[in-house]
Amino acid sequence: IRRIEAICGQKVYEYITNLKHTLHSVATLLGTNDIAEIKNKIEKLIQQNKKLQQELENVRLNLTTKNVEEFNKEKNLSRYFI
């Protein structure tokens, strides 16, 4: 047994109007007035986010490598001062 729900009449109009307002709000947040551009803007943001995450990972890796190298230098230099 399946239950099918539907809205009709004035409720349909209100539902669609609310969806349009939501889409326009999202478009404005994404910096566009065209709701057709929402998908492209979101895809671009996802790509930028992935790129930034990769850059952050590279910076963390480089920082860790430099810290290890500095530690090893200090360790090697400390032999001369003991």
Image (tube, rainbow, N blue to C red):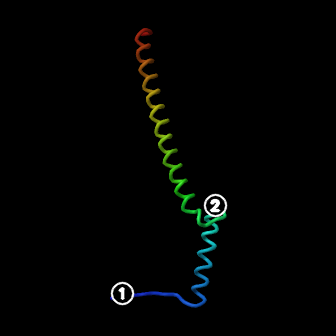
> Any mark on residue 2, and which?
1
Label 1 element class: loop
Quadrant location, the C terminus: top left
Q: Which residue is mark 2?
A: 29
Quadrant position of residue 32: bottom right
Give the farthest residue toward the bottom. Answer: 9
Residue at 41 percent of width and 15 percent of height: 76
Compute the Cα span from label 1 to label 2. 39 Å
- Residue type for callout 2: Leu
Residue at 39 percent of width and 87 percent of height: 3
Locate residue 65, reporting x and y percent. 44, 29
User: Quick one: label 2, few (<14), some, or many (20+) residues within 10 Å?
Assistant: few
Q: Can you say whether 2 is above or below 74 in the image?
A: below
Quadrant location, the N terminus: bottom left
Give the farthest residue toward the left. Answer: 1
Q: Nearer the viewer, residue 9 or 39?
A: 39
Locate residue 11, reporting x and y percent. 58, 87
Q: Can you say whether 51 is above or below 61 in the image?
A: below
Locate residue 55, reporting x and y percent. 50, 40
Residue at 54 percent of width and 58 percent of height: 42
Q: Is residue 33 left or right of residue 49?
A: right
